[in-house]
């Protein structure tokens, strides 16, 4: 199991344990986990429930079982590629008490074949804040380490939105900044049966909008303008895609985007969307005019 092997090969000047939440998998995962636990009883602690808990209850139970000063997340499909990953991140957090989270780049491999390998994130600030994270997640789950005990538990609505990584990061970022190490030290895998790869763009948008609304309630509206803008951008991107593909529901999603987020900062996108849907000929005309008036490169004579 690549995930376990990559954790076991970590070289540190501190002790650590590997807590495995094995949720009654129907394949050979439980047998493999039990074998590893027998081989490394002082390092691996397997949680083996009698019945399936569901993915989000499993996350809650596994997090609750962690006992260390820090927690590093690693899902079973992902793995770490640098043996000093944990050491470097712990050193960073020890040196930066103002930070609650530390993450690094990861190589995204798409087993569905829809996207080429890509290092994510392409760009990130050395130090980010809660406000940077609220519009959307830029932290690969396999790259993150955080201080344990900053929040009591995950909210119940995590099971509704069907993802927990961004929620965990937000709850931690409420108590400190987010530090970034530029090196790529993990592999994040997308696979056909994954949480996101099995969802349509519309389903993904709906889940994110629900998450924004629930998190806005959690913060009592303190970041409402950020969440409204984020909801609009999700609807805007989906509406643009519907218009480009000329889907039957394009009109519905264009209207939903246009009537959301009354903030003036969204007016440029709304103007583009409205023109693209209601007057596509204007966009083609403007594109043609731009090409027509583009200055040609000057010709330089070499002389006689």
Image (tube, grey):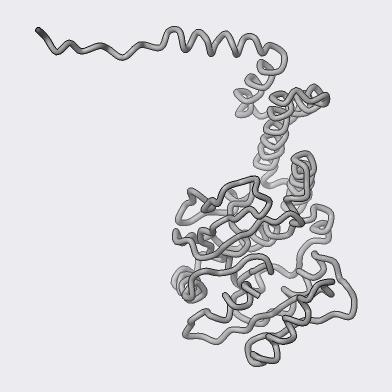
Quadrant of the drawing holding the N terminus: bottom right
Is residue 129 toward the left or the right of residue 66 in the image? Answer: left
Q: Is residue 273 above or below residue 42?
A: above
Give whichever of 67, 18 is nearer the camera.
18
- Which residue: 75% across, 45% down? 204
Is residue 63 toward the left or the right of residue 110 in the image? Answer: right
- Which residue: 85% across, 80% down? 49
Quadrant of the drawing holding the C terminus: top left
- Horizontal and vertical percent for residue 96? 46, 68
Residue farthest to the front, as pictured? 304
- Which residue: 47% across, 85% down? 13
Give whichever of 114, 294 is nearer the camera.
114
Residue farthest to the left, as pictured? 304
Q: Is residue 231 above or below residue 280?
A: below
Q: What is the count of numbered marks? A: 0
- Which residue: 76% across, 43% down? 209
- Horizontal and vertical percent for residue 210? 79, 46
Task: Name which quarter of the figure residue 157 lies in.
Answer: bottom right
- Horizontal and vertical percent for residue 224? 70, 42
- Horizontal and vertical percent for residue 44? 67, 85
Is residue 5 toward the left or the right of residue 124 in the image? Answer: right
Q: Is residue 130 above or below residue 80?
A: above
């Amino acid at each position: 199991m690549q995930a376990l092997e990559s954790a076991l090969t970590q070289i540190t000047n501190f002790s650590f344990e590997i807590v495995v939440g094995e949720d009654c998998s129907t394949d050979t995962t439980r047998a493999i986990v039990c074998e590893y636990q027998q081989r490394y009883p002082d390092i691996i602690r397997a949680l083996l429930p009698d019945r399936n808990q569901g993915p989000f209850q499993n996350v809650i139970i596994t997090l609750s079982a962690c006992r260390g000063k820090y927690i590093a997340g690693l899902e079973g499909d992902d793995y770490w590629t640098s043996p000093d990953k944990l050491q470097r991140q712990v050193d960073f957090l020890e040196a930066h008490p103002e930070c609650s989270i530390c993450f690094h780049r990861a190589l995204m491999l798409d087993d569905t074949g829809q996207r080429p390998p890509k290092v994510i994130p392409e760009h990130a600030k050395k130090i980010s804040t809660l406000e940077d994270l609220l519009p959307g997640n830029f932290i690969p789950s396999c790259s993150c380490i955080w201080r344990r005990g900053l929040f009591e538990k995950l909210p119940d609505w995590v099971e509704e939105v069907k993802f927990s990584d961004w929620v965990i990061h937000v709850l931690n970022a409420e108590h400190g900044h987010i530090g970034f190490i530029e090196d790529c030290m993990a592999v994040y895998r997308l696979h056909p049966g994954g949480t996101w790869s099995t969802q349509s763009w519309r389903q993904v948008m709906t889940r994110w909008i629900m998450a924004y609304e629930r998190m806005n309630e959690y913060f009592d509206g303190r970041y409402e303008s950020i969440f409204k803008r984020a909801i609009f951008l999700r609807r805007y991107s989906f509406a643009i895609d519907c218009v480009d593909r000329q889907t039957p529901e394009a009109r519905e999603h264009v209207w939903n985007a246009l009537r959301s987020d009354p903030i003036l900062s969204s007016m440029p996108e709304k103007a583009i969307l409205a023109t693209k849907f209601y007057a596509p000929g204007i966009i083609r005309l403007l594109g043609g005019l731009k090409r027509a008036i583009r200055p040609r490169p000057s010709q330089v004579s070499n002389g006689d």
